[in-house]
Image (tube, rainbow, N blue to C red):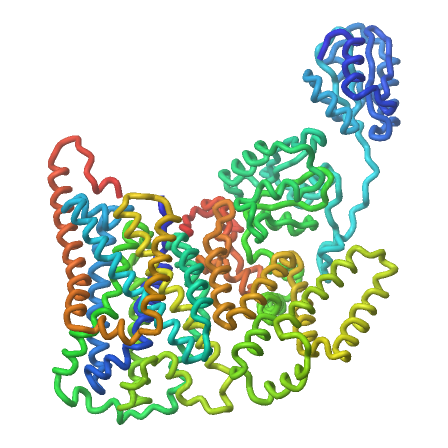
Amino acid sequence: MEKTISTNQTGLMLAIFTIALKLSALPAIAYSLSGASSYVTIAIALALDLIGTIIILKLLTKLPKGMTFFDIVSQTLSRPIAILIYSILLIYFLLKSLITLQELHDYYIVTLFEDLNPYFFVITLFLIMLFMCQKPFRALGRTLEVCFWPLLIGITFTLILPIGDMEIINLLPVCEDGFAPVLNGLVHTSISFGDFIILLIFMGRISFDEKKPCKKIIVYMLSAISFIFNFYIVFIGCFGNTAVGQTLALGELPLHNANPGTIGRLEWITIIIWTVVLIIQAGILGKCSCDCIKQIFHTDRDLPPAIIISTIMTALLLISYLQLSTILHIGTTTVVSIVCYGIHWGILILLIISYIILKNKNKKTYSVPHSMPVKEHR
Amino acid sequence: MRKNLQQSIRSIKKTLGDSKELIVKKISNKKNMAIVYMLGLTDTTALSKFVISPLQQSTSKDVNIDTLQSSIIGLSETTTESVEQKVIDAILKGKGVLLIDGESQAIILATDKYKERGIEEPPTSAVLKGPRSGFVENLKTNLSILRKILATPSLRTISMTVGKHTSTSIIIAYIDGIANNKVVDNVKKRIENINIDGVIDSHYIAGFLEEKPNSIFKQVGDSEKPDVVAAKILEGRVCIIVDGSPIILTVPFVYLEDFQSGDDYYGDHARATFLRWLRLASIFITILTPALYIAVVLHHYKAIPLKFLITIINTTKGLPLTPFAEILFVLILFEILYEASLRMPKYLGLALSIVGALILGDTAVKAGLISPPAVMIVAVSGLSIYCIPDQAAQLNILRLLFTFAGGMLGFFGITITLLFVVVYLCDFDSYGSPYFAPIAPFINNDIKDFIYKTDIVNMKYRPKSIANNRRNLKRQGEHNGKNNIH
């Protein structure tokens, strides 16, 4: 049986997942789509994610313990449908992990290296991915618990360092060009959202607290959302119209006001911490992909899926090397964005349907005398 | 055992190779008897006074095992044994054996006596204030020291013997009701399964108790101090005492255990908190300083403030070695000096330190072979390692690993290696206890005795990081509680 993860670990993983992909290329993309109101776009998208998270959490607490998303879909709909959903999720996670790794590479180029050896970089990433993909989610969750305080320091420095250069005028008036740019941004940036999907992979492994089972997870999610929103405010406040050109916000923002006197001090802590965040994010995505393979091929072994996923990730990284903008360009097309919305909300709807079917099945079981109702297994 | 006395003696002599140290003293009273013992291992005075004399002077008509044990033999500890191999083991352990003609059992007489070292302060864990006694090499003495501190009827012991040729006695000790029975059973099972020629020291057993034997990380706690072991037992750990070793093993073991020192509990808690932070910092200084220096000089010189950068450039100008090779060279030199100073006769130690520190270090710098920053970096790292001496071995390996990573890939390599190590440690469990607890998983109750040290008054519960009896976590009074660890 898979080792369970606590709500604290789940919350941290969800928070990291929510934060990581939104701080690099997305700010510039969102600005190009929604203009100065891009923070409104982000706020709405994050609010939608929060709603999705709350719905999934509520369902997870009501479903039988130990039941995975694959189990519930297999039982209520059919096994081929479950395999199809997990195949879609596998591609989705791989695409996201590719973006994460590309962002990691670009982040390093901007902040630390000018001549990072691509082979060393890729080989090292392959090894760490292979290692992390083999480990249970619990190990990754615990790793994030270790990183919690450094993460908090990183987040604080990321927001505090450039705050002096902010100009509120860059943020006002809110929705100057109406709601259309906001909507445009919402339609095209869905690939960076819908992070509540990972909760479906965690399903059956989370050990909810007896009192207020979802409280910690929602608090972490709210903290992450609040940080992202503030990051966008600071980013647009600092860069204004030039925000479109800042293709790596996370790398540019901490260095924004760096005068020669500050070099070699605080921003290095931030850089190292964000590197850790991006690698863990890629690790979680890799692990989610491994889990999809394990469910599809009905295997309990950890090593073969880990080898497959890390090899695919490395190969994709090599093929698309230094082409983050191309990947993001594809990722923000209308078709891909709508597909992503379909994945996020379609799967959520599927979970709701499965839950209703399972509940009805249980009711029928209750009506049969001397039968063992599913509820008793909880 | 054979009923015939002569046959029994012959068999024992044959098994022991007719050793000259094997003494067989025949006594004839109502029955023919013989006392068999090993010269040098047995207390002959006690044997003469409490066994031989009473046997010779006895006028009892009915001489059998029971009357001998209850009325004639004056020793407080006697047992009977019918298996010949166990009788031979007892002789080899220094016990006297009384063989009686016509009896298939032998009486084992507790007359073993060794010249043992006195109880003194262990050199590896000296304290400024607090108990100074240390364990010795004798199992019985060690157990008695422990029993003196833990004078509770709940202190349970399980005796075992391991080693084909050493028959080393091992005792598992724990407090019933505080220790987790699953952990006790697991330890017992692991020791029972040991099939080895001999056990010379407790670390032989430690290897078999480790859940991941190939790991470089320590997985079994050890201590030479009775107060430390007693405190660990009170927290719910199980201790393993091995005859012949002054080091007592404890399980479960969590990584941050070595950050705690006996001194922390006998002094001011604020000072203890400061020292714990210092120990934590020393780990990072040890493993990261050489790696960060190389990474900065080789890959990220822009990260250094300008004045500092100029200083480094001035001192490293014209060196024949690259910063990476230079640091590696000094690190290996440091290790050679350390190893040599340990093995060298004591009177040569001072000379060696002069040679090492002054001649090698100073001359190498003056000759322009290595730079002063490299020597300083390795010296700081080398000193920091001994803030947590129990972790020295693994920190040494980690330091080399990080140095390589920093040299090859700069900050990226260091970050990746750090992640490797943290994920690896987070995936680790020691007898059901998370290895990185109470940080990961975060256990609020236990933080007060790890990251900071609170006053003893506020430490109301036993650590939840340890797999102990969850229904008895309160240090005072009774408590029924549950705790889920992930």
Determine if residue B321 is in view. Answer: yes
Residue closer to the observer: B154 or A161: A161
Query: Residue at the spot x=49%, y=91% of the render?
Result: A260
B282 up-or-down from B445: above or below: below
Q: Quadrant of residue A197?
A: bottom left
Left or right of residue B265, residue A226 in this image: left
| Residue A137 vertical position relative to residue A190 in the rendered view, above or below | above
**Left or right, A97 with reference to A75:** right
Viewer-nearest residue: A143 or A84? A84
**Image location (x, y in percent) of residue B436:** 50, 56
* Residue B365 placement (x, y as % from top left): 74, 78
How many numbered badges does the structure rendering display? 0
Instruction: Give the quarter of the image for residue A104.
Output: bottom left
Q: Residue B16, relative to residue B173: is it above or below?
A: above
Is B187 or B426 nearer to us in this picture?
B426
Q: Horizontal placement of B77 versus A182: left or right?
A: right
The x, y position of residue B363, in whole percent, is 79, 76
The residue shown at (69%, 71%) is B379
Place of residue B317 in the rendered image (x, y in percent of width and height, measured from the top left): 66, 84
Pick the front one: B387 or A84: A84
